Amino acid sequence: MGLSEISEVSQVLPFLFGMIISFKFGFTKSKSIFLIVLCIWSVSEIYCLLNPGKHNGYVYNLHWVLSTLFLIYYFKEITKLKVYTLSLLYVLFIFILVIQFGFLASFYSWNMPVVYLSSFMMIILSSYSLILMVDDASEYLFRSSAFWISATLLFYYTASLVSFSLFPEALTVNDKKYDYFWDIHSSVNIISNLLYTYGFLQRF
């Protein structure tokens, strides 16, 4: 099993661990929303792992779109965003999706503008949530699940935005010279999944 396959399998770890912890100690609204995001990630990664020879662009587009929609609501829960701010984020995101998939590109192939937009929005929201937590810092900051999840989301989406911006052709060109790119991305994904899992050990 290569690093890429380990990365895809590791996606299931935080979801399973989060479900076990939640059943034992109870579900919160924010925890339930993030578990839905982890489920979306897990299903898409497992599907692509089991169907490596197929064109999976639409699966990754669904992966990015659905997870972003739920993560916006997740950040609304942990930061107490106003309803109009939440509505504005949804309208902006959906409007750009309609323009992109309706007029500029196919939904069935990798769509970099969606990756860039999702990453940019998640970087802003995770940074904002971390600033609020630090401003309200207590001795329990590093024992907060919300802190570890926000920090990990910031790490993952920043790494994704930088790597996909530097090597966009790696997504569409099957060339061994890009193997190192996928190794780096897989390593980032594995580290992120371990940190999400650690986050579920902490209190919400």
Image (spheres, rainbow, N blue to C red):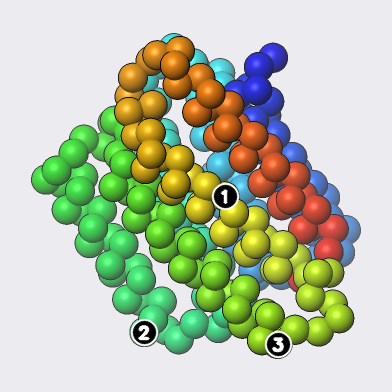
Label placed on residue 57: none
Q: Position of residue 119 (x, y in %)?
A: 43, 54
Gap in angstroms between the C-alphas marked 2 and 1: 27 Å
Amino acid type, mark 1: Tyr
In the image: residue 143, left or right of residue 124: right
Sequence-first tag of 3 and 2 = 2
Callout 2–callout 1 Cβ contact below 8 Å = no
Sequence-first tag of 1 and 3 = 3
Callout 3–callout 2 Cβ contact below 8 Å = no
Q: Using the image, determine if residue 78 lies above or below residue 8.
A: below
Q: What is the crowding at mark 1: few (fewer than 14 residues within 10 Å), some, or many (at least 20)?
A: many
Amino acid type, mark 3: Asp
Label placed on residue 136: 3
Q: Where is residue 38 in the image (x, y as percent from the top left)?
A: 62, 48
Q: Using the image, determine if residue 48 lies above or below residue 23.
A: above
Locate the C terminus by quadrant: bottom right
Q: Classify mark 2: helix, strand or loop.
A: helix
The residue labelled by disc 2 is: 84
Disc number lying in front (3 or 2)? 3
The residue labelled by disc 1 is: 156
Q: What is the crowding at mark 3: few (fewer than 14 residues within 10 Å), some, or many (at least 20)?
A: few
Q: Where is residue 74 in the image (x, y as percent from the top left)?
A: 56, 67
Q: Is residue 46 visible?
A: no
Gap in angstroms between the C-alphas marked 3 and 2: 24 Å
Q: Classify mark 1: helix, strand or loop.
A: helix
Locate the N terminus by quadrant: top right
